[in-house]
C-alpha cells in the first residue's frame, strides 16, 4: 500500500478483457494485447511489468484512446469512472485527456514539441481545460514547475526542450500531467535513460502525488527496483497477457511464475559476492509461441513440461486464483524454496 493507503470508493479505472490487434495488408494479424484485465482504485499504484514487447505500452495507449484507427482493432472494455472508453468518440476522449486522465510518456525529448517553449506547452493544458486567461495560466505554470522541482521556473518557461536536462524535461512532462489534478495518471517508463539520482527524485515525486491527491497511478516499467519502491500491486505481462498478479511484498517474497522468478534473478545486487554472474532468462521475447499453441513462455522456461504446449478446453493456461490476492497463469509454478536468491530481501527492503 501507499503511505496513506488506497482511498475508499469504486475503482477509477476498470479494464476487462482488453485486446489489441494490429493488421497489415498481406501479413498475418498481430495480437499485441490479449485479454488483459485489471483495475486501479483512488490512491493506489499498480505496476505493469515485463520485457520490451510484452504489450505494456500498447495497453496504456489503448486505455488513453491514443492508438491509430487504421489497421488497429481494440476490443474488450475500458471504463473510467464507470464511463466506457472503447469506441468512445474523439471529442469525449479529448475532454478527458489532460483533465481527468493524463499520461507521462517514455521519452520526454520526443514527447515535447522542440519548436515551442516549455511555458507555452504547460499553459496550453491550463487554457484548454481550466478556462484560465493567459496571465493566470502563466502564474500557475510557474507554480507547477516549482512543484516538480525545476529550479528557476520563471526562466524555464521561456526555454525550449533542448535547453533542459533529461531530468528537467521529464519533470516538465509531469508538470503538464498534473496541471488539472487528474484522477488517473499513467506513467510509461518515466525514469528510462535518467541517472539513478534523478530516477529517485522522479519516483518520490510520483509517490507524493498519489499520497497527497489520491490520484490512481499506473506505472509501466521493466525495472523491478521501481516496482519494489512504488507499487502496491503488480501485474507481470508476457506476450500480451498478464501471467501473474500479486501484492508487491508477496510477489517479491514468493514469485510463482517462472518468468517472474527469472526477472528477479536477473537483477544485479549490491549484496552479491564479487564476480557473481547474473542469471538472465535464456532466449529472448521473440522466442514466444502463440498462446493458441500453449504457454508463450514455454520455450524459455526451465520448468516447462509437455502439457505446457497443449490446449485444454479451448483455454491456454488460464489465469487462476493462487491464494489470497494472487492470480497465476502457469501449470508448473515455482515453489517457495525455488524463489530467486535475494527476492525476499529486495521486496522487504522497500
Image: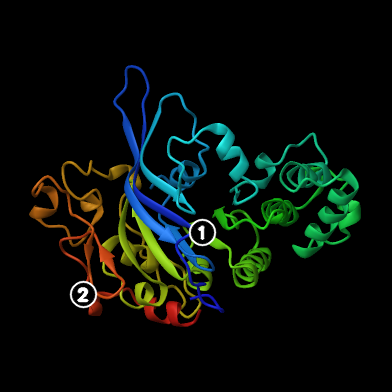
Q: Is residue 164 above or below residue 5?
A: above
| Residue linked to disc 1 | 219
Residue 70: horizontal and vertical position, in percent? 45, 24
x 38%, y 80%: residue: 344
Q: Which residue occupies 38% across, 61% down?
A: 235
Whichever of labels 1 and 2 marks the residue nearer the N terminus, that label is 1
Residue 144 visible in the current orientation: yes
Assign a secondary structure to mark 1: strand
Can the viewer see residue 257 in this picture? Answer: no
Is residue 342 shown left or right of residue 2? left
Q: Relative to the observer, which residue lies in front, 212 or 36?
A: 212
Q: Do the residues labelled 1 and 2 touch (CB within 8 Å)?
A: no
Left or right, residue 173 beside residue 53: right
Q: Please, which residue is most extreme toward the top here?
A: 26
Taking the spot 40% from the left edge, 77% from the top edge, the residue there is: 249
Rounded to the nearest angstrom, the CA distance separating label 1 from label 2 is 28 Å
| Residue 205 percent location from the top left of the image | 66, 67
Q: Where is residue 73 in the image (x, y as percent from the top left)?
A: 37, 31
Disc 2, SS: loop
- Report which quarter residue 22 is drawn in: top left
Identify the residue position indicated by label 2 in the image: 335
Q: Is residue 311 above or below residue 206?
A: above
As drawn, is 25 to the left or to the right of 220? left
The colour scheme of the drawn protein is rainbow
Residue 46, horizontal then vertical, whole percent: 46, 63
**Image quarter of residue 21:** top left
Taking 132 as reference, is 19 left or right? left
Amino acid at each position: 500500500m501507499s503511505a496513506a493507503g488506497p482511498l475508499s470508493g469504486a475503482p477509477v479505472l476498470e479494464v476487462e478483457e482488453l485486446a489489441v490487434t494490429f493488421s497489415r495488408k498481406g501479413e498475418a494479424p498481430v495480437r499485441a494485447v490479449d485479454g488483459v484485465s485489471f483495475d486501479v482504485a483512488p490512491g493506489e499504484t499498480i505496476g505493469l511489468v515485463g520485457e520490451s514487447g510484452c504489450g505494456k505500452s500498447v495497453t496504456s495507449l489503448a486505455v488513453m484512446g491514443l492508438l491509430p484507427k487504421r489497421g488497429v482493432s481494440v476490443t474488450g472494455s475500458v471504463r473510467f469512472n464507470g464511463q466506457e472508453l472503447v469506441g468512445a468518440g474523439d471529442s469525449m476522449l479529448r475532454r478527458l485527456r489532460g483533465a481527468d486522465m493524463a499520461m507521462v510518456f517514455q521519452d520526454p525529448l520526443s514527447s515535447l514539441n522542440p519548436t515551442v517553449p516549455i511555458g507555452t506547452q504547460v499553459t496550453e493544458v491550463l487554457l484548454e481545460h481550466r478556462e484560465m486567461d493567459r496571465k493566470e495560466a502563466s502564474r500557475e505554470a510557474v507554480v507547477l514547475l516549482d512543484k516538480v522541482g525545476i529550479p528557476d521556473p520563471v526562466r524555464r518557461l521561456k526555454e525550449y526542450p533542448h535547453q533542459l536536462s533529461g531530468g528537467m524535461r521529464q519533470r516538465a512532462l509531469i508538470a503538464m500531467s498534473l496541471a488539472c489534478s487528474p484522477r488517473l495518471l499513467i506513467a510509461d517508463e518515466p525514469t528510462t535513460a535518467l541517472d539513478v539520482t534523478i530516477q529517485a527524485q522522479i519516483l518520490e515525486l510520483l509517490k507524493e502525488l498519489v499520497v497527497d491527491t489520491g490520484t490512481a497511478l499506473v506505472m509501466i516499467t521493466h525495472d523491478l527496483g521501481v516496482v519494489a519502491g512504488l507499487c502496491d500491486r503488480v501485474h507481470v505481462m508476457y506476450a500480451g497477457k498478464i501471467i501473474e498478479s500479486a501484492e508487491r511484498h508477496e510477489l517479491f517474497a514468493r514469485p510463482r511464475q517462472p518468468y517472474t522468478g527469472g526477472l528477479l534473478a536477473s537483477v544485479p545486487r549490491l549484496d552479491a559476492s564479487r564476480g557473481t554472474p547474473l542469471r538472465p532468462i535464456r532466449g529472448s521475447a521473440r522466442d514466444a509461441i502463440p498462446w493458441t499453441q500453449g504457454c508463450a513462455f514455454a520455450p524459455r522456461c526451465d520448468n516447462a513440461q509437455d502439457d505446457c504446449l497443449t490446449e485444454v478446453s479451448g483455454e491456454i493456461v488460464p489465469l487462476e486464483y493462487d491464494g489470497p490476492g494472487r492470480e497465476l497463469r502457469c501449470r508448473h509454478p515455482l515453489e517457495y524454496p525455488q524463489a530467486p536468491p535475494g527476492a525476499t530481501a529486495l521486496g522487504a527492503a522497500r
